[in-house]
């Protein structure tokens, strides 16, 4: 009987804690979308809602521009045109790439470029205190 009571007490304590602090966010990894100009993270706020300094904005813009230039070097002119068309049609970056039907070499190169830019972005944002 005592163990049932202690289990109910623990459950009630957790429930009361959750109800008292409804805006507490659960730790979750950030999701970065390669084609987005605004980085979106899981949680209640996006990075664009934070008051980033001009220096941080410039660094993030530089990472995006380098990523775009590197991807342009991998793609042919017709592939670039089709990718831009797909993105403007509302496709997300992975969907737009899938529609291109790229060779496996080009696809792997682009995935590597995107991964490097994600790591650089995370590195830049890790030095910025998020409130």
Image: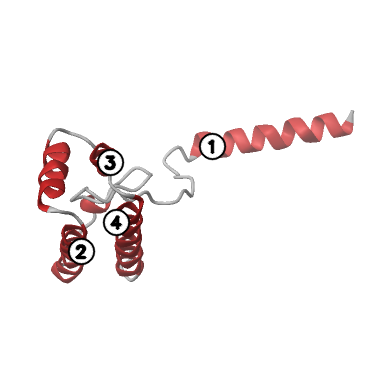
To which quarter of the image does residue 112 belong?
Answer: bottom left
Q: Nearer the viewer, mark 2 or mark 3?
A: 3
Label 1 packing within 10 angstroms: few (<14), some (14-19), many (20+): few
Residue sitting at 16 percent across and 47 percent down?
79
Q: Position of residue 17 (x, y in %)?
A: 56, 39
Residue shown at 45%/37% (left/top)? 22
Q: Secondary structure at mark 4?
A: helix
Please indicate, yes or no, whether residue 11 appears anywhere in the rendered image. yes
Residue wearing tag 4? 110
| Mark pair 2, 4: CA separation | 8 Å
Front residue of 45 and 63: 63
Q: Tag 3 or tag 2, which sits nearer the N-term? A: 2
- Are dots 1 and 4 in contact, CB under 8 Å? no
Residue 131 visible here: no
Element at label 3:
loop
| Residue projecting furthest to the right | 1
Badge 2 marks a residue whose secondary structure is helix
Q: Residue at x 27, y 51 (%)?
A: 34
- Position in image of residue 61 (x %, y %): 16, 63
Which mark identifies residue 70?
2
Q: Tag 3 or tag 4, which sits nearer the N-term?
A: 3
Depth check, mark 1 against mark 4: the one in front is: 4
Q: Earlier in the sequence, mark 1 or mark 4?
A: 1
Q: Please state which of the two labelled residues, at mark 2 or mark 1, is closer to the viewer.
A: 2
Spatial separation of the CA atoms under disc 3 and disc 1: 47 Å
Q: Residues within 10 Å of mark 3 (few under 14, many from 20)?
A: few
Query: Could you tell me which residue is drawn at 22 percent across and 35 percent down?
Result: 91
Q: Disc number at residue 101?
A: 3
Near-viewer residue (61 or 96) = 96
Mark 3 or 1: in front is 3
- In the picture of the structure, the residue carrying the numbered disc 1 is 18
């Amino acid at each position: 009987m005592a163990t049932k009571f202690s289990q109910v007490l623990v459950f009630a304590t957790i429930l009361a804690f959750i109800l008292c602090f409804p805006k507490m966010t659960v730790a979750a990894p950030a999701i970065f979308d390669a084609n987005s100009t605004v980085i979106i993270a899981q949680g209640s706020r996006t990075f664009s809602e934070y008051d980033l300094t001009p220096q941080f904005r410039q660094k993030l813009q530089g990472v995006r521009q380098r990523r775009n230039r590197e991807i342009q070097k991998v793609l042919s002119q017709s592939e670039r045109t089709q990718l831009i068309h797909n993105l403007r049609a509302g496709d997300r970056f992975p969907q737009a790439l899938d529609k291109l039907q790229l060779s496996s070499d080009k696809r792997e190169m682009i995935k590597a470029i995107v991964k490097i830019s994600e790591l650089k972005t995370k590195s830049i944002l890790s030095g910025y205190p998020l409130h």
